[in-house]
Image (tube, rainbow, N blue to C red):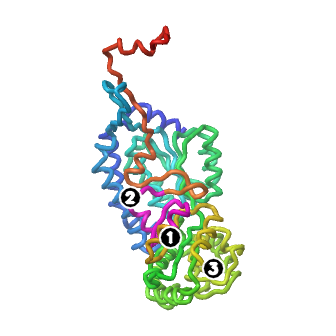
Amino acid sequence: SVVKALRSTFRSGVTRKLEWRLTQLKALKKLAFENQDAICNAIHKDLRKPKFESVVTELAMLFEDLELTITNLHQWVKPTAVAKPNLLWAMDTIQMSPEPFGVMLIIVPWNYPIQLSLVPLVGAIAAGNCVIIKPSEIATHTEQLLADLIPKYLDQSAFAVITGGVEETKELLNNKFDHILYTGSTAVGKIIMAAAAKHLTPVTLELGGKSPCIIDSTADLYVAARRIAWGKLINSGQSCIAPDYILIDPSVEQKFIQQYQKVVTAMHGNDPQKSDSYARIINERHFDRISNLLSHGEIAMGGQTDRQDLYIAPTIIRNIDLDDPVMQEEIFGPVLPVVTYNRIEEAIDIINDRDKPLALYIFSNNKKTVKFVQENTSSGGFTSNDTMTHAACNTLPFGGVGPSGIGGYHGKHSFDAFSHMKPCMHKYPGLESLNDVRVAPYTPKK
């Protein structure tokens, strides 16, 4: 019934109007601005995420996309002229005209519950769609907050929040949508895609995988350790683009581990469990899964766990086998395996023997090596000498490739992803005699 009601709204044509879209975007901005404390508090209750992290990784990205979209939407909605291939089309108007898909479904994960619901919503509104948001039932406080706030600020005839768990999601997927965005695991992504295929519904899938991080012998190890620690430990490692494992030149392995220990201590003190800047694992099930990964290899740093507190210390594991469990699944926690390689080609082979990752990182001061890795691997995103930051640049699309995802969004790319770019040709009505050549009767002269 909710889908039917939203489809009725879409067919009324109201969402196609630029003024309506801008009104809803400004209302979403007001929602975020007026409820910053409530949002940060809800996220803290779900993940013990520090307020600073919530502001930077959840709200700041939302506000940036809102400002960009509100400022430029009047240009984005205009048809775009395309080149005329030859004189045959000289008198015609040829355009690409963006039109909304219709009714969208956004299925949200628990790890960044505001960013991954409201940032894509910006693009969906900008494109003129109606939207159902399905927050994760695992992040219960944020789920309820979204269910309370969305109807208060946005047009209830065009936007809805559906709460609940697996059964509610299955029921939603029985409906025909015009586009589905899902963020989460590859395993569930396959289920979403199969459900969408029954209705031939296009999908954007933001999945995950094991994002590798190469460190060669030329890297600045302090910079590498600090930037890797930031990317690995923000949200306690529960980020789909966190560096999942290290591939390192053996000549600098020990020095890197020493630097990593130093920067983690500088960030979180001698006991990170007491740090106000360190989040917690979402629940017992994920805590147990990550803790079980510590049973192989040599713990070179950390390893402390506290199930009652859902705390896992920043941890490095070395001397592991590529077949060990920690190298078989996305870790999604603050555990960092370190694997050595002898030649850069060996590191590339290790990466290419696995599914294409959502992100790939390299720390090196050798531009030829960086270029070689970039050109001989495939990943959703590629960043040298940093981690995670490519996803915060909204002039770049964020997305995966192959098992790590389909499609991408952020900024203008969100508008494009959630619009159908309709080819339009407006023929010149005169000079009909020029069309004699294409109509019967066909003759050798023609």
**Which SS class for mark 3?**
loop
Choose between 61 and 396: the one closer to the eye.
Answer: 396
Image x and y of residue 145, in percent: 46, 59
Crowd rating for badge 2 (residues with CA inside 10 Å; few <14, some 14–19, many 20+) = some
Q: Which mark is residue 394?
A: 2
Q: Quadrant of residue 41?
A: bottom left
Q: Nearer the viewer, mark 2 or mark 1?
A: 1
Count up the numbered dots.
3
* 385 w.r.t. 114: above or below: below
Task: Classify 92 as above or below 337.
Answer: above
Q: Do the residues labelled 1 and 3 touch (CB within 8 Å)?
A: no
Residue at screen point 40% across, 64% down: 392
Outermost residue toward the front? 445
Q: Which residue corresponds to mark 3?
A: 307
Disc 1 to disc 3, C-alpha distance: 31 Å
Q: Which residue is drawn at 55% across and 82% down?
A: 314
Q: Which of marks 1 and 3 is nearer the N terminus?
A: 3
> Of the residues under marks 2 and 1, which one precedes in the sequence?
1
Please state which amino acid type lies under the numbered disc 3.
Arg
- The circle on residue 9 is none
The residue that appears at 52% across and 43% down in the rendered structure is 179
Q: Is residue 384 magenta?
A: yes
Q: Mark 1 points at which residue?
A: 361
For the residue marked with disc 1, what is the amino acid? Answer: Tyr
Name the front one of labels 1 and 3.
1
> Marks 2/1: CA distance?
19 Å
Mark 3 or mark 2, which has the lower sequence index? 3
Q: The C terminus lies in which quarter of the figure?
A: top left
Instruction: Tell me where the magenta segment starts and ends, as one range.
Output: 373-398
Report if residue 378 lies within the magenta region.
yes
